[in-house]
């Protein structure tokens, strides 16, 4: 049963998110600006999961009883819904994992181990999250391949002029984020894909920060692999998608072994199952997949166009207000070259101290390296502050952030 969603209006959409009414630190209004780490869930998603557990849940693909068939149908609807969300050719090109990290590890282990050797190169960018660095470093250590990085300009945009020189016939895989989780930088993945394909490299796009905000079309972009996480787009934690072109997935050996991923097992060995089960060993994230269906349906009803337009207004307002503050420095590109993420520093206040002071005022932002240490090394700061927005945030919340920063500066000035 689906609950109708209201037309786009941030104030009324907020009423779908019970957690946004939670009071923090006694009786402070919560201003949740940590959406790049994880978004919140509307009641439609929570209700769908509840319905499953109350009326439809059993393990999938194994039973021939009624409940198992119900559950299996819902699990496969989640696959079809996810495939349509990214315009995959076939649902079997969607493998459910526990998240973006698991999806990238699957490719590095399965495709990477089978295809890379000494002297081969893996090309990443300095914008990457550790999830899109470490699995490739591990692959390089196993195979003797080398990891290289596309550098960035001072404003956090990729130095694309160097891409040509870095892409050679030795490059076997290019793995790149579509949007930086720190600076918000939009990356021209379509150009990168066509240039990488021209030298015969396979491309993985880390869509963790783009799939919740903009249209993803794997057929139009021609990408080979793409990964995203449910919890960053209103879905439950513990579910992620790995898209792979069918021809590539067919050739790849299974990564994890166990139940469900086999056709036959004997004491001598095993025969792997078909796609996509071959990559889904063990009991999959059934309830999380069903919740992901509800999350995607919710986003579809609002429309990504409306979301993007509104997030642009939030980002512009946040940029204008924060850049007008004395002692506040925004890092990253101009607002039209990035998503609704503002990365900033406050003069004389360590990001962790600032985040704690903002939290005391009800403002949830993130401080630290945001799982992007190589990027922070390049920026020259060990830690930064990050406010990241989603469509349920409001212009008033941006103003509350600004007021809280000013109050924090006042307190720190007094105590120094
Ligand atoms: N890639 C990017 C760009 C991210 O922002 C994140 C999470 O913040 C990840 C990968 C990892 O996602 P997950 O923790 O859901 O696996």
Image: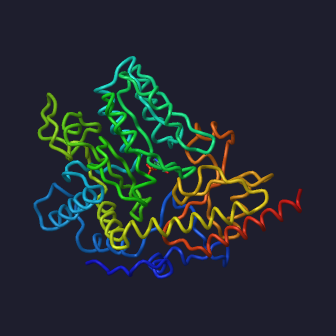
Q: Quadrant of residue 223?
A: top left
From the viewer's perspective, is residue 407 above or below residue 7? Answer: above
Tell me which colouring the rendered structure shows.
Answer: rainbow
Viewer-proximal residue among 23 and 413: 413
The C terminus is located in which quarter? bottom right
The N terminus is located in which quarter? bottom left
Residue beneath the point at 36% across and 69% down: 303
Residue beneath the point at 23% across and 33% down: 253
Viewer-proximal residue among 42 and 189: 189
How many numbered discs, if any? 0
Q: Quadrant of residue 193?
A: top left
| Residue at far top of view | 118
Q: Give coordinates of residue 145: x percent, y percent.
A: 41, 22
Residue beneath the point at 46% across and 26% down: 165
Left/right of residue 379 with respect to residue 113 in the rendered view: right
Q: Give coordinates of residue 358: x percent, y percent.
A: 70, 64
Q: Give coordinates of residue 309: x percent, y percent.
A: 47, 67
């Amino acid at each position: 049963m689906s609950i109708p969603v209201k037309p786009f209006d941030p104030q009324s959409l907020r009423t779908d998110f019970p957690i946004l009414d939670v009071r923090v630190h006694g009786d402070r209004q919560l201003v949740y600006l940590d959406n790049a780490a994880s978004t919140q869930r509307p009641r439609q998603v929570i209700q769908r999961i509840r319905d499953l557990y109350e009326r439809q849940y059993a393990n999938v693909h194994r039973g021939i009883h009624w409940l198992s068939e119900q559950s299996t149908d819902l699990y496969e609807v989640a696959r079809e819904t996810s495939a349509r969300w990214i315009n995959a050719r076939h649902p079997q090109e969607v493998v459910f994992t526990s998240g973006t990290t698991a999806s990238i590890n699957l490719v590095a282990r399965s495709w990477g181990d089978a295809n890379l050797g000494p002297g081969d190169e893996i090309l990443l960018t300095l914008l990457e999250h550790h999830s899109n660095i470490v699995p490739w470093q591990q692959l390089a250590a196993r195979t003797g391949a080398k990891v290289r990085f596309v550098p960035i300009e001072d404003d956090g945009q990729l130095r694309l002029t160097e891409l040509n020189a870095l892409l050679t016939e030795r490059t076997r895989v290019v793995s790149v984020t579509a949007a930086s989780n720190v600076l918000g930088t939009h990356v021209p993945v379509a150009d990168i894909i066509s240039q990488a394909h021209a030298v015969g490299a396979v491309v993985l796009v880390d869509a963790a920060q783009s799939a919740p905000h903009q249209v993803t079309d794997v057929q139009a972009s021609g990408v080979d692999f793409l990964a995203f996480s449910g919890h960053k787009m209103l879905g439950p934690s513990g579910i992620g998608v790995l898209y792979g072109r069918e021809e590539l997935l067919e050739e790849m050996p299974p990564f994890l072994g166990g139940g469900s991923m086999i056709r036959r097992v004997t004491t001598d060995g095993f025969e792997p199952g078909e796609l996509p089960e071959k990559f889904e060993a063990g009991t999959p994230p059934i309830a999380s997949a069903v919740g992901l269906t509800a999350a995607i349906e919710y986003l579809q009803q609002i429309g990504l166009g409306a979301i993007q337009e509104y997030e642009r207004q939030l980002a512009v307002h946040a940029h204008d207000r924060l850049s007008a503050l004395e002692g506040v420095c925004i890092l990253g590109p101009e607002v039209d070259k990035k998503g609704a993420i503002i990365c900033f520093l406050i003069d004389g206040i360590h990001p962790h101290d600032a985040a704690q002071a903002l939290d005391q005022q009800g403002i949830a932002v993130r401080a630290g390296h945001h799982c992007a240490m190589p990027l922070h090394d390049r920026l020259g700061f060990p830690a930064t502050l990050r406010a990241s927005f989603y469509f349920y945030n409001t212009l008033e919340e941006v103003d509350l952030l600004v007021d809280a920063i000013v109050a924090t500066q006042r307190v720190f000035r007094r105590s120094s």
